[in-house]
Image (cartoon, rainbow, N blue to C red):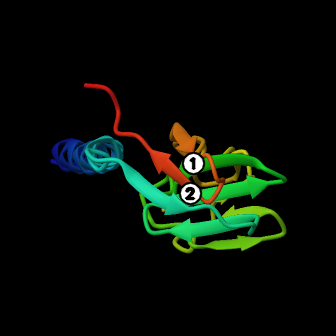
Amino acid sequence: MTLKKHTRRKFFQLAAAGTGFSMVYLWDRMMGNQLLTTLHQKIVLPLTRHLVSFYGDYIVINQKQHVKVFSSHCTHLGCLIDKVENDRLICPCHGSEFNLEGDAVKGPAYKPLKAFPFKESSDGQQITIQPAET
Ligand code: FES
């Protein structure tokens, strides 16, 4: 009787753990797929002289004319990053931090932000993010 009860408890613990891991995996896959599917058309953004500019799904970093464009979706669970402090991009949900190269420097996120290729206009006023080749 005790053995059967103990086995049932173990089963439910393992089932709960498996379900939890599956949910995290699926969420991670969904967020990755969302990033891949959101860029079906070219996106034109202003290029300001600000070090960091937030434009919805995108973050534009402009370090002395060295420009980078990242997804603003945190690589942990996909929250929108909308804050910079001390040259760190900070996720409001669980506190992950990324440096201005997009690398995760504080967890729980451990993957870098997705970088997007782009073209700068000849007058230096805009950048155009191209949809991925299909
Ligand atoms: S979603 Fe950004 S730290 Fe969790």
- 53 w.r.t. 32: above or below: below
Look at the numbered discs 1 and 2 and tell me whether their residues touch, using CB distance below 8 Å: yes
Disc number for residue 121:
1
**Type of amino acid at the residue the image marks with label 1:** Ser
Going 75% across and 62% down the picture, which residue do you hit?
A: 88
The residue that disc 2 covers is: 126
Q: Position of residue 60 (x, y in %)?
A: 61, 58
Confirm or reject: label 2 Cβ below 8 Å from ligand 1. no
Task: Identify the secondary structure beneath mark 2.
Answer: strand
Q: Of 109 and 79, which appears nearest the observer?
A: 79
Residue 40, quarter of the rendered image: top left
The yes-or-no answer for disc 1 within 8 Å of ligand 1 is: no
Is residue 130 in sight in this rendering? yes
- Most foreground residue, 21 or 134: 134
Looking at the image, residue 38 sits to the left or right of residue 101; the answer is left
Image quadrant containing the C terminus: top left
**Residue 8 drawn at (x, y percent):** 18, 47
Horizontal side of 116 relative to 77 (left or right) equals right
Does 95 sit left or right of 134 as displayed? right
